[in-house]
Amino acid sequence: MELLSGADMLIRSLQDEGIEYIYGYPGGAALHIYDALFRQDKVKHILVRHEQAAVHMADGYARATGKPGTVLVTSGPGATNTITGIATAFMDSIPMVVLCGQVASTLIGEDAFQETDMIGVSRPVVKHNLSVRHPEEIPEVIRKAYYIAATGRPGPVVVDIPKDMTTPNERYEYAYPKKVKLRSYNPAIRGHAGQIKKAVDMLLAARRPVIYAGGGVVLGKASDQLTEFVRKLGYPITNTLMGIGCYPASDKQHLGWLGMHGTYEANMAMHHADLILAIGARFDDRVTNATEKFCPGARIIHVDIDPASISKTVEADVPIVGPVDAVLKEMLSLVKESKQKPDADAIAAWWKQIEEWRAFHGMRYETSDDVIKPQEVIEILHRLTNGEAFVTSDVGQHQMFAAQYYKFDKPNRWINSGGLGTMGFGLPAAMGVKLTHPDDEVLCITGEGSIQMNIQELSTCKQYNLPVKIINLNNQALGMVKQWQDMNYESRHSQSYMESLPDFIKLAESYGHKGVRIEKKAELESKLKEVLAMKDELVFVDIYVDRFEHVYPMQVARGSMKDMWLSKTERV
């Protein structure tokens, strides 16, 4: 049996778990671990410039690959700097393990230098947290951490590691567990057969059905099953912001995504549906609007791996707890075997109505001969990249424009902070994606407010040669804040204009990157072509867009799904 120190056990456990990258920042309580990292070459460490960026990098990696991300930080401020990133992952159910150095176990509770109760601080925003109490526990703790993070409804797990658990001169027998035994944690591996049969019968009898898919389809790697199922039925499908890409956006059955800034046809179809099949979605408030007015004529089938999500905000008529891929596979089999077929006339009439809604709005927006519209930027990027890029975003108007006008046909390519809405997410997330997909185009769609929250990571990009393309839709304001102030506060723009902005071109150049400024509409497409041709360069593209543009459609606050603003003057 091999004898290893606690620090070496930790790194060996990561190797045995198949971890490729650690994103982190060193400090006193984690130095034994960093020394163990130095003495091996299988697990690569990426040195960020701020711990929040480390978590967002791990998050971007996890969203793009489907595998848990890994973070390593020191105690105290190093650990607390991760909280926003952990909360971001928690809200969007992203698998991740955050390894936090801690002061020696003998000093815990003594207000020692850089001591923080990371277990207590992180508890509201983690799936689970663990603390190492003896070096011999490390392999088992690490095995449990990754198992919990990646199974069931995924999420972040924090592991607190006191410094004396990693002391170099104390060695113990090392054995990495092949299996995990957790008495109180048993995620479902299939749905209830009777409930699935009932759901299929209801689906085949529906006259105005809508399939409503969420991020759980992407996380559950069930896009292929969903696509086959939807095409077999011939029913309309919509998805949430987190579910973008789970079904091809270019397909004629796709209605676009739904909710606060969803398409007119998706929101109208949901409101008038008589049956909704919700798959891997949690009926977030940005979808439902006022829950008491949500889809009043619809019966609801809700499929989710997390039993706590079902009927949490909207009552389900048929609840099904189980992995979405397994449930969809069973549903598809029953549909194929069933002698009952959908009512062809009713479904045709339903599609006729949907096509009328689609023709009425169709994501229209006003163009200008001289002013660059943000929607145009996204449409050009989609065309120039053939819709194949990985796209990360920050949070605000630019995020909504990117989601609306870049049509994703594949899962795992739209990378954004949905639930928490974290500004500063886009750049480090793009870095995490680019690191593991070096040959793919990775775009970070951002705004001048968001990009400055983690702009120091341009330094990390230079060190590790991460040539992402930063597309800054610069309207010199906190765009979404300003839009709400226009709509709800009689255009009293309290602290929403960004004054004294840096010269982003010179700033990018100071970090050793390229910078391109675009101010004229006539040069937009040609310059973006030039930028995308610079395959080996990080390029910061500063595009001056219409300062007064709003994101539409937009649901009317506290209304139903059919209550929307379609422009600054048009409300339905």
Image (cartoon, helix red, strand yellow):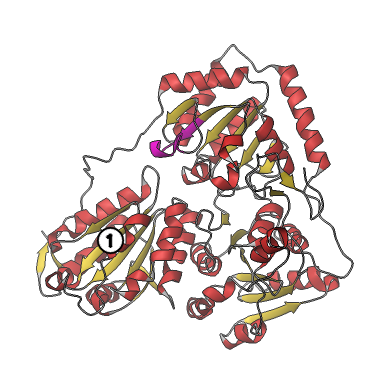
Given the current orientation, which residue lies at the most extreme top position?
A: 339
Front in this rendered view, residue 389 or 307: 307
Give the residue pinned by disc 1.
120
Question: Dot 1 lies on which element?
Answer: helix
Q: Could you say where residue 227 lies in the image, as x and y percent from the top left?
A: 60, 36
493, 157: nearer the viewer: 493
How far across and down, in percent of the image, does residue 428 sit?
Answer: 50, 69
**x 16%, y 74%: residue:** 110
In magenta stretch: residue 223: no
Give the amino acid at mark 1: Gly
216 w.r.t. 24: above or below: above
Which contiguous range is marked in magenta?
A: 302-312
Residue 514 % position (x, y): 64, 81
Q: Is residue 340 left or right of residue 191?
A: right
**Image point (31%, 48%), residue name:** 148
Residue 396, quarter of picture: bottom right
Q: Residue 332: percent from the left, percent from the top?
A: 54, 25
Q: Quick check: 407 above or below 538?
A: above
